[in-house]
Image (cartoon, grey):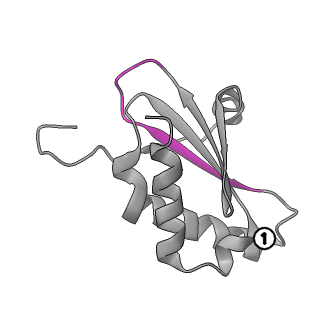
Amino acid sequence: MPATGKPLQPGRLRKRAEFLAVRRGDKRRGRFFLLEVLDRGDANAPRVGFTVTKKVGNAVVRNRVRRRLKEAVRVHAAGDMLPGSDYVIVGREDVLTAPFAEIGTELSRRLRKAR
């Protein structure tokens, strides 16, 4: 935690190689998403990446799933991410119909699971 007392906002994973590296880590399956976690072994801010496969639907549907997951991380789960870790969240179609609070709760619970 920085000197201000607020948790670090997670950075973003952007390159394909970064996403592939996280696949070597721990996998936590949930109803709304698959969470992949990799400990980088440093003390830098956590990083997060989002992906939604074409099985979920067309581009409009996939983007809606991704937007809901991004907001859930921002509002509910950013403080649960450990420094020095990378996270990839693979969204599922159930994210669209679930209550937003339930998505955030599930995400926080999955992030804290390995502590």
Q: What residue lies at 36% left-to-right and 35% top-to-bottom?
A: 45
Q: Is residue 113 left or right of residue 57?
A: left
Q: Nearer the viewer, residue 54 or 35?
A: 35
- In this rendering, the answer to whether 70 lies above or below 94 is above
Q: Quadrant of residue 96?
A: bottom right
Q: Is residue 36 left or right of residue 55?
A: left
Q: How far from the left and from the top, in percent, is residue 101?
A: 46, 74
Q: Secondary structure at mark 1?
A: helix
Q: Is residue 37 left or right of residue 111?
A: right
Q: Please report the bounds of the magenta region as a residue range.
A: 41-52
Q: What residue lies at 47% left-to-right and 31% top-to-bottom?
A: 85
Amino acid type, callout 1: Ala
Image quarter (top left, top right, bottom left or bottom right) of the C terminus? top left
Q: What residue lies at 75% left-to-right and 70% top-to-bottom?
A: 93
Residue at mark 1: 59
- In this rendering, the answer to whether 1 lies above or below 73 is above
Q: What residue lies at 48% left-to-right and 39% top-to-bottom?
A: 47
Q: How far from the left and from the top, in percent, is residue 28?
A: 64, 43
